[in-house]
Amino acid sequence: MKTRSLQRVAPSAVLLAALTANAACQVWTCRDTVRILRDEPAGESKSVALAAARNEWEGFQILLRSDAPVRGVSIEPDDLQGPRGAALRGADAVLYRQHQLELTLPSYRNNNFKPGWYPDPLIPFLHPLTRQPLAADARFKAVPFDLPANETHGFWVDIFVPPGAKPGKYRGTYRVTAEGRDMAKIAVELTVWDFELPRVSTLQTALGSPVERMRGYYAKRAKTGKEPEPKDWDAVEAQVAHEVSRHRINATPPAALLTPQKEPNGSYSFTTEQVNALRKFVDTYHVNALQTPHPRSAVKDPEAERDKLHAWLKAFDQMAAELNRPGVTFFTYLKDEPNDEEEYHYVQKWGPPIRAAKSVVKVMVVEQTKAQNEKWGTLYGAIDIWCPLFPLHDEETAAQRRALGETIWTYTALCQMKPTPWWQIDFPLLNYRVPAWIAWRYHMRGLLYWGGMSHWSGVEDPWTDPKTLDRRKDGKGLLYQGEGTLVYPGRAVGYDGIAPSLRLKALRDSIEDYEYLAMLERAGLRAEAEKIVLPLAESWFQWEKDAAAYHKAREKLAALIVKAKK
């Protein structure tokens, strides 16, 4: 592939055929990781130039604003025609309309808050798994959409570059229609780079189980007579697993697949059926990390019952050998945020006996590598996977633990300590893309988040109320808009399951960005990649705020990968 094909195409090189049915209506595009609010004026980008590797998703926004109402707006994608007869089918593009939430109050510590209508939930045009039309009586529909006067509204377009796609430029047109008539034509160009992202991501994720959260959510609502539980939980589980894996996030298998049976002789084992079902799940949804049950499900005292504990762990060793997926990490979530002496002693008691078994099951604790209080002692020798909060990462002690073969993950929650890329709806959308860059910069290998991506229980309706974690009382206290959520209940848009968000799209892009960096690291080019990354991702407290800079850096990383292949 020639080097010039890696260069960014200037917008002026791609034409917009503006067949405007209503001259007062403006249509524009945006490929950057930014959120366009309802009251923002029209932009100037009349085309979009994208780039992606094979086996990668690439998204962009189509925005509209009109001086007068426009009825029946929709998007019609054409095929993107590529080199030597190749094409990316328009029918394979995944389209959404951006639903907006009104935010009148800021999340805690958001000093730059702007009241307004924030787009976040994404309403799919079609069922995300079956690709069939959605229920006609859905509360919210993607299209046709009636655009109100003097309001900015948007659509999200996802294009997937399949494995084996020919490298080069693909060009086509996306038509914006109103009541079936062309209102505008947007020229789309996508450069396919001559390399392919692996099927299984390098960055490991543990963002919880939306299905598990949904079971509790709908059981509670059914009990109070608000709405029934889903009739087909198997279909819900399939849709959820498909949706999160499509965003390169680990799906959570049914708990029964990771629960060993106790044998009469005191050993534990997994059946062939369990192993085969788990292998199918791992392969179908590209899983790279599996959370096992907590060891306390087998023993009450890890020291007094060490033999029993090790017999339980041995079952996972045997199962992992039969599974034969060496890239999958098994871990137990031993303790969440041990913040006092008693909780430190808990980790000190449980961690060493588990690690002494030298099992495939690794011990994860959500804690930083530097001890909180020297009087409590350290957790060294008790942990395999450390998971510090963004601002609590200690580079010196983390490097020491990594040198001993231990692993560092990271996580965020609320708005704690010095400002980092906090995850609430009213903070910049870029905050969901930046952490993977910073994580790679610090040799971190995993990302954790709480709430199962679906902490909806704090509000009556997540589609109209973003205050998912509201600790205020009598109007005073801490509020976190969208905390613990990355997806929305699919029922409101015509199916049982989950609907994605703009934040989930940004997170997916960040995991794909991390893959570029991991590929370069495996190729022995970490130093070259760091020259591109460090100016953008200096630390958890200092990062580039210009979203366009990450696209430019990504293009430079792609050029390094292509060059390394030659």
Image (spheres, rainbow, N blue to C red):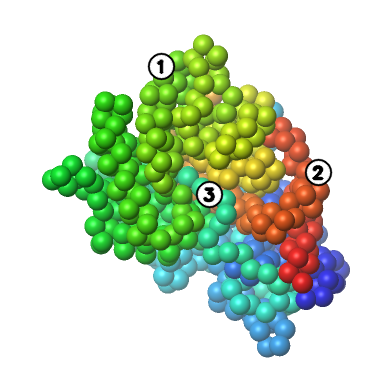
Q: Residue at x 34, y 60 (%)?
A: 322
Q: Residue at x 51, y 41 (%)?
A: 448
As drawn, which residue projects farthest toward the top?
A: 375
Which amino acid, by three-letter code, is at mark 1?
Glu
Which amino acid, by three-letter code, is at mark 3?
Gln
The alpha-carbon separation of the residues under discs 2 and 1 comes to: 41 Å
In this figure, which residue is indicated by the disc labeled 1? 342
SS under mark 3: strand
Q: Mark 3 touching mark 1, by CB under 8 A?
A: no
Decide which of tag 3 and tag 1 comes sooner along the chain: 3
Q: Residue at x 70, y 59 (%)?
A: 523
SS under mark 2: loop
In this figure, which residue is indicated by the disc labeled 3? 204
| Residue 337 in view (yes/no) | yes
In this figure, which residue is indicated by the disc labeled 2? 535
As drawn, which residue projects farthest toward the left?
A: 264
Decide which of tag 3 and tag 2 comes sooner along the chain: 3
On the rendered structure, is 256 left or right of 287? Answer: left
Q: Quadrant of the N terminus?
A: bottom right
On the rendered structure, is 399 left or right of 297? Answer: right
